[in-house]
């Protein structure tokens, strides 16, 4: 399993709606709207990095109201 965080900027006033839409997508583990430089933080998961990049991330980017995304794969370094 490969997981990543996706940091998302949305159109003004759309963070809550975008987070709720994203929460229902396949591969989305959690979706939270937050304050700060990003509006929504996702945790996503797939069987492989290739599947994450080809299936989950593009589906996320298609949601209306998103202006920018930054995907950060989780390294899992130091975990047993």
Image (cartoon, rainbow, N blue to C red):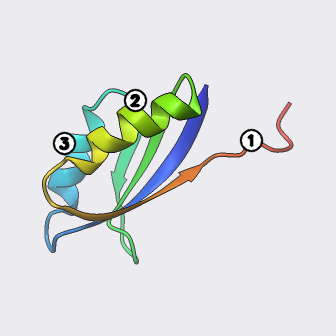
Camera-side residue: 41 or 72?
A: 72
Mark 1 → mark 2, Cα distance in angstroms: 18 Å
- Which x, y percent locates residue 22? 26, 42
Residue at image coords 36%, 72%? 35
Asked whether residue 28 appears in the rendered view, the answer is no
Looking at the rendering, in which quadrant would you find the C terminus?
Answer: top right
State the quadrant of the N terminus. top right
59 vs 14: above or below: above
Residue 42 place in picture, x, y as percent: 41, 48
| Residue at mark 3 | 21
Place of residue 15 in the rendered image (x, y in percent of width and height, measured from the top left): 22, 61
Examine the rendered structure and indicate whether residue 34 appears above or below residue 78.
below
Q: Nearer the viewer, mark 3 or mark 2?
A: 2
Mark seen at residue 76 = 1
- Find the distance from the CA under tag 3 to the CA under tag 1: 28 Å
Which picture quadrant has residue 14?
A: bottom left
Q: Is residue 19 left or right of residue 6?
A: left
Which circle marks residue 33 in the picture? none
Q: Is residue 50 left or right of residue 9?
A: right
Looking at the image, which residue is at 18% across and 48% down?
63
Q: Secondary structure at mark 3?
A: helix
**Dot 2, how many residues are within 10 Å of its Cα: few (below 14), some (14-19), or many (20+)?**
many
Q: Secondary structure at mark 2?
A: loop
Marks 3 and 2 in Cβ contact (< 8 Å): no
Q: Residue at x 46, y 39 (%)?
A: 53
* Circle 3 Cα neighbour tier, 10 Å, few/some/many (<14 / 14–19 / ≥20): some
Mark with earlier residue (1, 2): 2
Residue at which label 2 appears: 27
């Amino acid at each position: 399993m490969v997981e990543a965080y996706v940091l998302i900027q949305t159109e003004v006033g759309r963070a809550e709606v975008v987070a709720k839409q994203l929460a229902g997508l396949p591969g989305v583990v959690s979706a939270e709207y937050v304050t700060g430089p990003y509006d929504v933080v996702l945790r996503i998961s797939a069987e492989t990095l290739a599947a994450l990049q080809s299936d989950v991330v593009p589906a996320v980017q298609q949601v209306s109201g998103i202006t920018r995304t930054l995907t950060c794969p989780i390294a899992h370094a130091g975990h047993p």
